[in-house]
Image: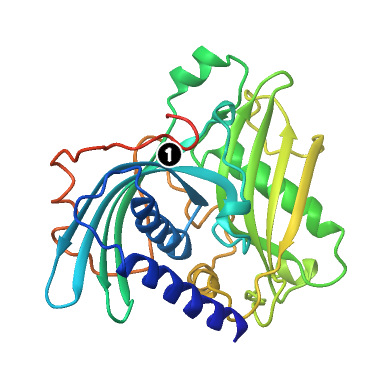
Amino acid sequence: MNSLVALVLLGQIIGSTLSSQVRGDLECDDKEAKEWADMAVRYINEHKLHGYKQALNVIKNILVVPWDGDLVAVYLKLNLLETECHVLDPHPVENCTIRPQNNHAVKMDCNAKIMFDVVTFKQDVFVKCHSTPDSVENIRRNCPKCPILLPRNDSHVVDSVEYVLNKHNEKLSGHIYEVLEISRGQHKYEPEAFYVEFAIVEVNCTAQEAHDDHHHCHPNTAGEDHIGFCRATVFRSHASLEKPKDEKFESDCVILHVKEGHVHSHLIEHHTGKYSTSPGSNSTDECVVQCPVAFVNKELPTDISDHHTTPVKGCPGKVFHFQL
């Protein structure tokens, strides 16, 4: 209830600020442009289904168009950068670390349309985005020994996740965890290793029950503290064709304190609703170049990309972090 009240108050504060200064001649570095962009980024982070939260990097274009009655349409073209916070992480994006360039950074380009009622402060946000990792050539040119991003369904990545999670579950006396989503895999050098990041969910099975083909495990999502996130490094040769057995590894798994009713609860329902005990089954596509970004289902207006081609004075704006 408190979070709902806070959200309503925040909307009213943003609304009163913007409604008193809705201008059609905004430049990308104007304070009001930043407020519109922050509104779009907030929506993106609350509705993005996979991967990581995003931080605003560049406002590339903005156009405010009068609409019917008290409505205005705000069209934005944004450049965002991936943070190290998973979308299920309850921390606000302001507290998340931007993934550094030497850790194979990823950018996201978004077109956004915000329909805003200047009287009621009601807003309706629509976004269309795609993500693009920094090129391997750029990484190797600037940092030859930096880890390189791999497809999330790469066999070394999936095997490393399985291995680490099995080791984690061996320490548990009660219910175990299964893979919810593999969100990142990288090939490291000197020493050679595979670095992985993945979300996990507690299931209503013990380790013994999980190996029983007649026992069906299901996510235990009632209440809180049943979602976790792991970062791990498994030291092994890239040439190795066998699954890891007794490899050295380092891992850190934390529980994400996502309370019932949290703004990201619908994302957890999305993941567990499509839950499968096959590691890497969720969002482990081979896309490592330019990838469409999945959001909670919402029909997009046909004009969402129509207002970003006309150059606007004072755009693009400043770079908040680094150019990618």
Residue to which mark 1 is pinned:
107
As rendered, which of 176 and 143 lies closer to the eye?
143
Q: Evaluate whether residue 21 shows in this view.
A: yes
Residue 226 horizontal side relative to residue 126, left or right: right
Which residue lies at the image location 47% right of the left edge and 65% below the top edge? Answer: 46
> Alpha-carbon neighbours of circle 1 within 10 Å: few (<14), some, or many (≥20)?
many
Q: Is mark 1 on a helix, strand or loop?
A: strand
Tell me the amino acid under the disc marked 1.
Lys
- Where is residue 258 shown, x and y percent of the image? 65, 71
Which residue lies at the image location 44% right of the left edge and 17% below the top edge? Answer: 137
- Where is residue 62 shown, x and y percent of the image? 25, 49
The correct choice, above or below, for 262 with respect to 142 in the image is: below
Which residue lies at the image location 56% right of the left edge and 55% below the top edge? Answer: 93
- Where is residue 33 shown, x and y percent of the image? 33, 52
The correct choice, above or below, for 8 with respect to 84 in the image is: below
Q: In which quarter of the image is residue 287?
A: top left
Which residue lies at the image location 66% right of the left edge and 36% below the top edge? Answer: 195
Residue 236 horizontal side relative to residue 307, left or right: right
- Where is residue 243 shown, x and y percent of the image? 68, 39
As rendered, which of 5 and 165 lies closer to the eye?
5
| Rendered-image quadrant of the C terminus | top left
